[in-house]
Image (cartoon, rainbow, N blue to C red):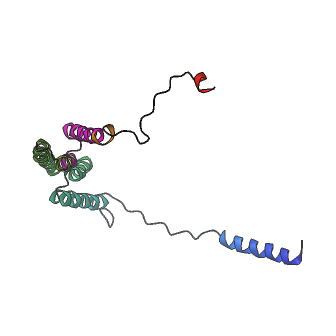
Amino acid sequence: MTPRMLRLVLLASVVLAGCAARPATAPRPSTVDARPGVGSLDATGAIVNRLKARAREAQSGQRWAEAITQWEVLVLLQPEESAHLEALDAARQAAREAGAAHWRTAEAARNRRNPDAAVLAYLRVLAADPHHTGAAAALKTIEAERAGRTWLNRPPRGGYTAPATGDESSDRR
């Protein structure tokens, strides 16, 4: 090995050794006791307050599925809190009412033979109530109708070709 090559290898190993140095460890965060009244932070209270704010914001924006999820988590965290259960029931009722209103709009659009407006309304039904089977089935039917019109009524690109008969000996003459 030449001296120049030796210097390059030595320089490369020094650079690699510098990159492979042990990283500095971050100081460990101090532990916080999450019991109410103990320590400097009531962690459970902060989480509950954040979830309540998210739930109320979702309700004001009429994002019912999101609001219901937040209230369900709150009920799981604090089952003794009856206000959470009442808010959950109210959000579920509002979601059912919104879903029913969008369902009527969707059915009216479908009866007017306006599939685009019907699809939009059915999607709003599913946004309000993700488990609404009627809206999901209606969307599936509309998409099948659209697919049937656009693909099944059109001839193939290459034109018509006769199906293979399975007798390939006649092609070899």
Specify the principal SS of the magenta part: helix
Q: Quadrant of the N terminus?
A: bottom right
User: Which residue ends up furthest to the front in the rendered image?
Assistant: 173
**Number of marks present in the image shown:** 0
Quadrant of the drawing holding the C terminus:
top right
Quarter of the view holding residue 162: top left
- Magenta stretch containing residue 75, yes or no? no
Nearer the observer, 59 or 30: 59
- Residue 144 lies in the magenta stretch: yes
Q: Is residue 7 above or below residue 71?
A: below
Towards the viewer: 91 or 37: 91
* Rendered view: 20 above or below 152: below
Estimate the x, y position of residue 48 in percent, counting from the top left: 25, 57
Tell me residue 40's x, y (percent). 32, 67
Q: In the figure, residue 43 lies in which quadrant? A: bottom left
Q: Which residue is painted at 30% across and 38% down in the image?
A: 153
| Residue nearest the observer in this picture, 38 or 2 | 2
Question: Residue 36: x percent and y percent?
Answer: 27, 59
Q: Nearer the viewer, residue 16 or 145?
A: 145
Which residues are the magenta region?
122-148
